[in-house]
Image (cartoon, rainbow, N blue to C red):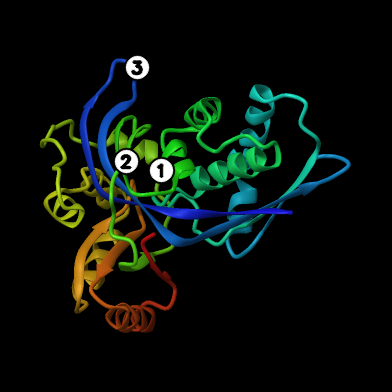
Amino acid sequence: MIQEIARAKLNLALHVRHRRPDGYHALETLFAFVRDGDLLALSDAEEDSFAITGPFAATLLAEGDNLVTRARDRFRAVFPDQRPCAIRLDKQLPVASGIGGGSADAAAALRAMATRANVPHDHPDLLACADGLGSDVPACLLSRTAVGRGRGEELMPVDGLAGTPVLLVNPGVGVSTAAVFGRWDGVDRGAIGSGDMLEVARSGRNDLEPPARSLAPVIDSVLTALNEQSGTRLVRMSGSGATCFALFDEEEARATAAAAIQKAQPGWWCLETTLV
């Protein structure tokens, strides 16, 4: 059995520069990844199968099409003569939440398939597979801090903030990425910075936050709750929402914040983790 963690993705900053002629948006983003995520397991089998377990399995099953099976099939199209396999996905991350759940799952499937086929994880054709599955999948295949440009697929790895305590909070509301981009005001507010990663993140912004907040006003409450906590270094919404996060100075401050938010909002999803 081959196991891969589909780590949750954070956008420490996300600048939308303009809409491209091909319909995509030109982005500049600072990707970071956390220790925790979904867990994907792949094993040999007589015939293909795919199963989903975990607290968010029902939501994902209701969507029908799944990026994991698409990743499996795309890998086989590029690297033929692969044996059948059984894939099980333990879905721990909320769906449509701005932390790359589906993209991370697809990337984990590609890594698992590549491991079984003895294909290096940095093989150009594997990277092309990832790019064809979605804009965030190449970053999730890498799963390390990087500046992303283009649609997000042009990656430049950078030294990150490994070990930084993080608290992720989702209010239980799914937000459509297409709808959020559709409400972006079209204003280019400038490029992402360079240098120290924390300062780059702090001086940056998430241009999708205002449209996401207009679609899901509860995001305001999540950001307010995080900003009220002590010991935060950065508070921001990730991706197109609705998950928000806070970076903390110390684990104790993170734990205190998590306890306070869970007491006030027991229906919200919280994850105490660290950057990798």
Q: Is disc 2 placed on a helix, strand or loop?
A: helix
Vertical arrangement, residue 84 with respect to residue 55, above or below: above
- In what quadrant of the picture does the N terminus appear? bottom right
Q: Is residue 62 toward the left or the right of residue 132 in the image?
A: right
The CA distance from mark 3 to mark 2 is 18 Å
- In what quadrant of the picture does the C terminus appear? bottom left
Front in this rendered view, residue 78 or 259: 78
Contact, CB < 8 Å: mark 2 with mark 1? Answer: yes
Q: Residues within 10 Å of mark 2 (few under 14, many from 20)?
A: many
Per the rendering, the mark at residue 22 is: 3
Per the rendering, the mark at residue 176 is: 1
Q: Position of residue 125 (x, y in %)?
A: 55, 25
Image quadrant where residue 157 sits: top left
Residue at x-position 55% and y-position 30%: 126
Chain-order first, disc 3 or disc 2? 3
Q: Position of residue 177 (x, y in %)?
A: 38, 40
Q: Residues within 10 Å of mark 1 (few under 14, many from 20)?
A: some
Q: Position of residue 200 (x, y in %)?
A: 16, 50
| Circle 1: residue type | Ser
| Circle 2: residue type | Val
Residue at x-position 61% and y-position 35%: 71
Q: Is disc 1 placed on a helix, strand or loop?
A: loop
Q: Is disc 3 placed on a helix, strand or loop?
A: loop
Q: Position of residue 78 (x, y in %)?
A: 64, 23
Per the rendering, the mark at residue 180 is: 2
| Circle 3: residue type | Asp
Depth check, mark 3 against mark 1: the one in front is 3
Residue at x-position 76% and y-position 31%: 82
